Image (tube, rainbow, N blue to C red):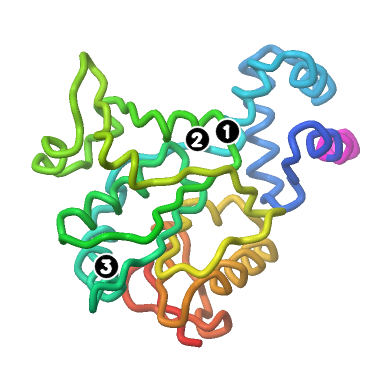
Amino acid sequence: MQNGYEVFKNQLFQVLGIDLNSYKEQQMRRRINQWLTRHSMASYTDLIARIRTDLDHRAAFTKYLTINTSQFFRDQGVFESIARQVLPSITSGGNMPRIWSAGCSIGAEIYSIAMLLIKQGARARELLGTDIDEVILARAREGTYSDSEVGGVPPDLLRAHFVKSGNLYQISDTLRRMVKFARHDLLQDPYPKPFDLVLCRNVFIYFTADTQKRLIHSFVDSLKPGGFFVVGSAEHIMDPHAFGLERVSYCIYAKTV
């Protein structure tokens, strides 16, 4: 199976452009094998054949593989620190910051930032959400969410920025106009710059240690001096100074160079 997995990785890169060499192998193989079992496929060869010919299956597998899970104001303590420390710093003196949510999934994170900016009476020059999955980006642009996805939104912000229709919540046109979404592959594409704040949360944990280091260097390079970098609650930068960062709060780092 090991040789079969190596062949599968090469074929998957040709079909989807996703480089599995950058992901932790044990986690990724377990995840793919679960997909095979769920869809009654006997081998990686069967899966490659299916995603070559079945566009719906290809889209579903890509979504599954890129682990698109998100909700508004996920990790409340982190967002409290962003509201209390980060946003006042990058909007002081009337500065209009550029903010990037990398691996944005359904857009909940960058829309949450937009809500905080409005609440503080601040404006951004750019709010960018990027992801590798075009299907999930289309959903982010649409801005329609379930009860569970908006469960973390404070009641006042839910009333101000969403309209409920049945069991779904539609985000306001004001927020949708504030945010731009674009496809971006963290492993292959050039990183946009410069930003006052970059968030990449709950993405690093799926990559190898070497890939994590490469990505952190790229993100730091995308930050302005003094800009902030936010990671997920399960992710820790063990030696932030090696990347030109210093830890300023739980999950939050500032660029020092």
Q: Identify the secondary structure beneath mark 3.
A: helix
| Vertical arrangement, residue 20 with respect to residue 42, above or below | below
Q: Identify the secondary structure beneath mark 2.
A: helix
Foreground: 61 or 168? 168
| Left or right placement of residue 84 versus residue 250 in this view | left
| Left or right placement of residue 89 versus residue 239 in this view | left
Q: Earlier in the sequence, mark 1 or mark 3?
A: 3
Q: Which residues are magenta?
A: 1-9
Name the chief secondary structure element in magenta: helix
For the residues marked 1 and 3, what is the alpha-carbon distance in whole angstroms?
Answer: 29 Å
**Residue 137, which numbered label?**
2
User: How far from the left and from the top, in percent, is residue 206?
Assistant: 59, 50
Residue carrying label 3: 87
User: How far from the left and from the top, in percent, is residue 136?
Assistant: 50, 32
For the residues marked 2 and 3, what is the alpha-carbon distance in whole angstroms?
Answer: 25 Å
Q: Amino acid at mark 3?
A: Leu
Q: Identify the secondary structure beneath mark 1.
A: helix
Q: Amino acid at mark 1?
A: Glu
| Left or right placement of residue 193 versus residue 246 in this view | right
Circles 2, 1 touching at the beta carbon (< 8 Å) = yes
The reply to whether the magenta stretch includes residue 30 is: no
| Vertical arrangement, residue 113 with respect to residue 241, above or below | above
**Residue 134, which numbered label?**
1
Of all residues, the one furthest to the left in this rendering is: 156
